[in-house]
Image (cartoon, helix red, strand yellow):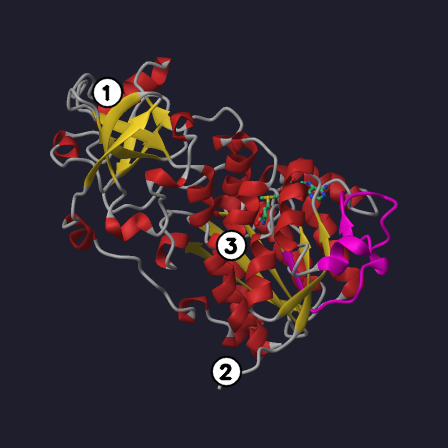
Amino acid sequence: MNKKKKEFKFIDLFAGIGGFHIAMHENGGKCVFASEIDKFARQTYEANFKNISPELFENGNFNVDITDPQLDYNSIPDFDVLCAGFPCQAFSIAGYRKGFEDEKGRGNLFFNIFHVLDKKRPQAFILENVKNLKTHDSGRTYQVICSHLTSLGYGIKCSVLNSKDYGLHQNRERIFIIGIKNCWKGERIPLPTDSKILKFDQIESSLNKQNYSKILDFNFSEISKKNIYSFSEIKNINKKWIPVLINGERINYLNPPKKIQKYFQKFEDRNDWSNFIYNGKEGHFRRAVNYINGKIRGETNMFNWDQWGEDTWTDDGYNNIYQWRRKYVRRNTSGVAPTLTANMGTGGHNVPLIVCGELENGDKLIRKLTPEECFAIQGFNQDVINNISKVPITNGQKYKQAGNSVPVNVVKLITSKLISLI
Ligand SMILES: C[S@@+](CC[C@H](N)C(=O)[O-])C[C@H]1O[C@@H](n2cnc3c(N)ncnc32)[C@H](O)[C@@H]1O
């Protein structure tokens, strides 16, 4: 018999396309309020959740701008868990000073989270940000965050987790901060001054000594790790060549390696492949294609072996994932994609690349991962991806949304542990 999931309510701030929403929903959560400012992300969010959380869109609880002075935080429906993957670029020491001066703290988006927590005092929260949040501004940013969260009575714990350790084909390190109400009995960490800045490990040790009860039971290292596969496993793929016509040209293509087929689509699944294939004729991409084909090997010695080296080109490339980094190509030999970023969709050329076939002359054919594949390696399931495919927005917007999102699998695991403690 299935154990009934504990029901709880949550809010989804800086909601993006709803990575948190999916993870919370799958753990028994009901979303009662969300906030997202970007009109394209809002379209995707609505497509993803209009069926599972219809009231959100009917009751005006899908807010546009969390900094809107008209929004009274007291009017947000009661909830148990606050989720927020707040934008990292908003953090600066100048920003938080402004935040302190401004009674409502509208100067910095973290303070919006802080004020919602202050007004609503939910049982728990999960915050997500880039890994270097801890070291940002010599640790002061992190210290400001910790001191504010603990001042509300939350015990907090924090860890940097890599998506590739949790069953996703992506190297994505993100910091997660969880908080549980009423288990912080320590002094509020003093706000930093220029002369007295605690290092983040000092903050952590003071937190750990004084925290007790539930927060001690939350151990990030207990969250089950699920490695994907080892390199030796994927070496023995069965090559299956199938001829296909692209833009009227006949080429031979290879389906993605078996082990990553789950994430990477087969050619016949879509008819706009030509948008994703590098034909080697487009400016700087020619260099990327030439690198991967080994044609400009050794042209420069500015690369280390990981990105460029003798061994790089001895394999056929079908198990690798590449990324063009402006001046060189980076590769991963175990099929793990580099960190997806929002600028994949805004002029950045760093969409991960895979070898997908061969031309008549034996050159490898290279293509970008599609936006759908990018959603998949953030942990979105096929149903959600199908929904997103139907949203009438550009591929550029989709890449941006995939790069901004939180890795769903990781949040799912954190949530199930967190919910058991509240
Ligand atoms: C790092 S992304 C978070 C993505 C989200 N966790 C997901 O799974 O898709 C931050 C989001 O905050 C949104 N945002 C920025 N300022 C905002 C504001 N003032 N009010 C609401 N949303 C905002 C951005 O548009 C962006 O989608």
Gap in angstroms between the C-alphas marked 1 and 3: 37 Å
Whether residue 416 appears in magenta in the rendering, the answer is: no
Over which residues does the magenta segment extend?
Answer: 54-83
What amino acid is at disc 3? Asp
Identify the residue at image location x=86%, y=59%: 75
Per the image, label 3 sits on a secondary structure element best described as helix
Q: Nearer the viewer, mark 1 or mark 2?
A: 2
Task: Name the residue tied to disc 1.
Answer: 290
Q: Is 255 on the left-hand or right-hand side of 211?
A: left
- The front one of 211 and 312 is 312
Per the image, label 1 sits on a secondary structure element best described as helix
Q: Is 203 on the left-hand or right-hand side of 363?
A: right
Q: Position of residue 240 (x, y in %)?
A: 18, 43
Task: Name the residue tied to disc 3.
Answer: 383
- Mark 3 is surrounded, within 10 Å at the Cα level, by few (under 14), some (14 to 19) or many (20 or more) other residues, namely few
Q: Which mark sits nearer the N-terminus, 1 or 3?
A: 1
Q: Position of residue 257 (x, y in %)?
A: 24, 46
- Mark 1 is surrounded, within 10 Å at the Cα level, by few (under 14), some (14 to 19) or many (20 or more) other residues, namely some
Gap in angstroms between the C-alphas marked 2 and 3: 23 Å
Q: Which mark, by number, is residue 2?
A: 2
On screen, residue 359 above or below 43: above
Q: Position of residue 99 (x, y in %)?
A: 75, 43
Query: Contact, CB < 8 Å: mark 1 with mark 2?
Result: no
Q: Is residue 61 visible?
A: no
What amino acid is at disc 2? Asn
Residue 328 placement: quadrant = top left
